[in-house]
Every structure is written in structure tokens, then in C-alpha cells.
Amino acid sequence: MKAVVFGSRGQLGFDLIRWLSKSSEVFSFSREEVDITDLEKVKKIIFEIRPDFVFNATGWNNVDGAEKVENAERVFSVNSFAPYFLLLLCKEISATFINVSTDYVFDGKKRLPYEEQDEPNPLSVYALSKLLGELLIKKSGYSKFIIVRSGGLYGVNGSYIAGRTYRNFVERVIENISSQKKMRIVYDVFSAPTYTFDLARKIVELAKEGFTGIVHIMQIGEISWYDFSRLIADLLHLDDRFIEPITLAELRAPAQRPNYSVLKNSVLEKLGKNDMMSVEDALKSYLKERGLIL
């Protein structure tokens, strides 16, 4: 089988390729190689390769940057309209389209893990653009799609070993504490930070088994970002005194965020496929892959 992956240099894209390459011919494109809003270029790639699966692991992920008026057109082009165009191309060749959405489509007021059928209520421009992408895909009339909602992603391609200036949350905590720099981390925002290697494993599994529809895929459990940062420090025997707990209100970020964006893997549970790792086990696996713990 053939698979196309857009966003190959991102954390999730990198891990999708690792899993797909075990059993498929993979054609991957980084954001620098292919801008998914370049419709003619994307169309040429899809029609020449004629893949069985198209994975969109790229997108505008700068949540605060999306609030700037001058970025609005680009945000919606990347997160809403480009995925819809990719879906229409997949329809032309009967391929399955896999698009990655976000836990931020919910407002956090439920205070219980969100299920796939719960009503979204985005609080930010970023979240709204992701939800619009979902709606366009669902209303297209083409059923061979998977919309994956997840969040709090971290993977090895967001670490220094990838040669990138970008660092995922885990790496930033490690770097700051190791250099004895104080970090201000919110203690009233809850998620289930998700290891992209585990996430990619499940996405590829569902795609190859013919699943279609919306699915939540997160690590099992929930934790505040403050406690997650302390867990990182504890596992690495680092001094967590440099982690300062603050409220979301004190953060004063341009974009509004949900205080609670834990997702329940309800569809996976119904399919008997909810073997995602716990929040702590996933973090341990990441740190082991990084060679930081045994």
C-alpha cells in the first residue's frame, strides 16, 4: 500500500512515517517542501502517486499567533480549507484521508473527559479553524476520512536531537530546570499529554483496518501541566523548586484556552482498541527513547 504524509518533519509526521514504513510505501513531504495551501502542487503529488492513504500532520499550531488579525487568512487556509481540498483529491482516487484536529475544539466547561459526540465550542481562532476543517470534511459527502482529535503532543522530533530550535514541552522543562531557570507553569489546566509515537501507532492501526469517522486518541488519565512538569523532574531526579505554579489567568496569553481538555477514547473503547498508555507510562517511554532513563 502507498501512503502520503504531509508534515514529515513535525513530531507526529515523523512518527507516522516510522509506523507506516513497516508495511507501506511512504511518500513524505515536509512543510518546507510542500505548502499544503499550494493546491496545484498538492494535486500533482496526489494524482501522480495515487496513494491509498493521505495523512495530514501539518497545520498552523501557533495558538497565540492565530489571534493576530494579519494571520487569520493563513490560519484558516492551512487548518480549514487545505484539508478540505485534500479530502476532495482523496475522493477522486478513492483514498482514505486522515486529518489531525485538536482537543481545543472544546471549551473545558464539562470538567469530565470529552467524548466524540460532545458538542464542540472553540474558544480561540486556532480552535475555530480546526473545527471548521472538521465540519468541511464531515459535510463533504465523502465518507473515507478519519478525524483524529488529540492534544498536548510531544515526540522525539521536537527534541534537540532533531537539530531543531523548536522544543516540545517536555524538552523545555528539562532544559530550564537543568540550567536552573525558573518556569511558570499553570496548575489549573488539565490535559493528558500525548506521546506522538503511541498516537501514530494507533492512527496507522485504525487507518489500515478501515475505520472512518471522528476518533479521540489521548493517553489514559489526566494531569495538570504543573504536575506533569513535576513528574518530568521527578523521573529525571531534577530539582522541581524551579517550577512555579500559576493560574491560567496569570499566564495572560493572547488566546483563550480551555481549563480542561481531557479526551475520552470512547470510540476506541467500543472497538476494544483502547490500549493507549497511561500519561506516566507514555512519558517514561519517551524519556527512555531519548536515552534519559533506563
Image (cartoon, grey):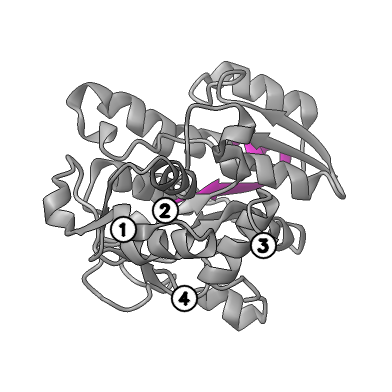
Q: Report the residue at 77% width, 23% height from top.
A: 48
Question: Which circle's residue, 1 or 3, is located before the other in the chain?
Answer: 3
Front disc: 1 or 3: 1
Cα–Cα gap, marks 1 and 3:
36 Å
Cα–Cα gap, marks 3 and 2:
16 Å
Q: Name which residue type carries label 4.
A: Gly
Find residue 221 and name its label. 4
185 versus 182 height, above or below = below
Residue 20 seen in render: yes
Q: Which residue is mark 2?
A: 102
Q: Is residue 289 left or right of residue 67?
A: right
Point out the image quarter for the N terminus: top right
Find residue 202 and name its label. 3
Circles 4, 3 touching at the beta carbon (< 8 Å): no
- The crowding category of the residue bearing disc 3, from other C-alpha atoms within 10 Å (few below 14, some 14 to 19, many at least 20), is many
Q: Is residue 201 left or right of residue 84?
A: right
Disc 2 on helix, strand or loop?
loop
- The crowding category of the residue bearing disc 4, from other C-alpha atoms within 10 Å (few below 14, some 14 to 19, many at least 20), is some
95 versus 284 height, above or below = above
66 versus 217 height, above or below = above
Cα–Cα gap, marks 2 and 4:
17 Å
Give 180 or 170, whichever is nearer the viewer: 180
| Residues rendered magenta in the picture | 88-101
Q: Which residue is mark 1?
A: 241
Circles 3, 2 touching at the beta carbon (< 8 Å): no
Disc 4 on helix, strand or loop?
loop
